[in-house]
Amino acid sequence: MLSIVLMLNIVTTASSTAASAQPENNGSFHGGITNDARTFANKTFDYVVCGGGLTGLTVASRLSENPNVSVLVIENGYADHTHPHVQDVRNFGQAFGTELDHNITTTPNPWQNGKELPLVAGKTLGGSGSLNGASWTKGPSSQYDLLPLLTGDDSWAWKPFNEYMMKAEHFNPPDSNAIAKGAQYEGSSHGKDGPVQVSFGAGMFGEPQVSALEASKRVWPGLQRNRDATVGDPNGATIIPDMVEPDESQNRSSPLTAYVLDQVKQRDNFHILTGHRVTEIVWKDGQSMVADGVHFQACRTRPVEFVRASREVLLAAGALQSPQVSLSFLQTRICTTAKRPLITCRTSDPRAIRCWRSEHSRGGGCATASGRIRCGKAPAGSD
């Protein structure tokens, strides 16, 4: 299956390209990760990235390779890379429905007796890339080759696209022991110099997988063993590597550990604010669709802060939450339903959008515990 992550770039004024490499009036300001909004309030950065998931952290890290620009990432979650539900891929699924998850659900499904089904979205640095099953594979090349027909851009085709996927990868070939247990790969289909560690986990790979493959062949006549699913043809039965460290720890190699942990310590121009979410894009007066910066907030009882972007605002809050921010330029309207009140939304047509409702959006009291900003539930009738 082909998965595409899209990020919306909102360009500021062209005259702003001569921006300062550091925030205005920053004193002894240095790069790093913090949840203190006062560090960034009313400062100016070249790039402000809304969301610290896979796309946001990757782009922010790449931008900050240039020491002459300043980059700020605003993320609702925290640096949870040592949490056992994040670090140990063998705990896959245990983070769902916890504070590491945004706990978003679908609307009631009539075919599920009105049940609201979970839509997992990581609420942590690295986003869902810190909660997923860490499998390293790719879709069929034929699907990528259709993308230029939709985008008008030939660089979305399989060959050029795959170059970037390989650029992100640091493949660790299986040792003789893993090969004896059935590990196979095509070296030309893997990258060697990227930051994302890819390997056959020492304790997660062994005889059970091979036995399962052989049993599958007996059940499904004609089933072929696929040597490596990353070559552009994933059909068949295969054993795929994972985004884990190659040593005995088998720790997850996430967007945070790959693109941020070391880099943010080494670069004074790379900054991350955790425990806050962007509430709206602020537009320049009299200039349609030209961003001035963003408003951000820990929760509704905390002050709304502003940070300016002198070059671009990059919207990378995920497929489920980027629309909430990108729609903030439309006219304000209070959205309600007969069953329950909803949050204040912005829409030019109340029928065009379903408003989102969550603990964070509803507000309530804030408290700090173990370095995390807690947003309590609002009292009854306080929406």
Image: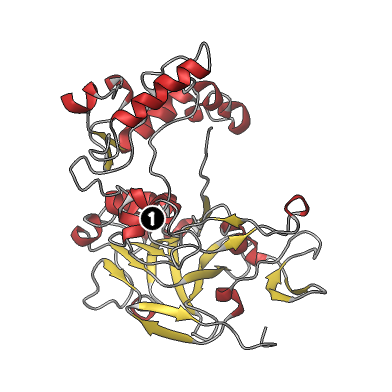
201, above or below 138, in the image: below
Q: Can residue 65 be seen in this snapshot?
A: no
Q: Can residue 165 be seen in this snapshot?
A: yes
Q: Residue at x 47, y 16 (%)?
A: 218
User: Which of the 4 image quadrants contains residue 70?
Assistant: bottom left
User: Given the image, on which type of amino acid does mark 1 rest?
Assistant: Gly
Residue 85: image location, x then y, percent: 36, 58
Along the line of sight, the residue nearer the viewer: 231 or 201: 201
Residue 177: image location, x then y, percent: 18, 27
362, above or below 91, in the image: below
For this view, does 348 lie left or right of residue 72? right
Residue 148: image location, x then y, percent: 56, 27
Mark 1 nearby-residue class (10 Å; few <14, some 14–19, many ≥20): many
Along the line of sight, the residue nearer the viewer: 75 or 154: 75
Q: Which residue is mark 1?
A: 126
Secondary-structure class at tag 1: loop
Q: Residue at x 21, y 76 (%)?
A: 28
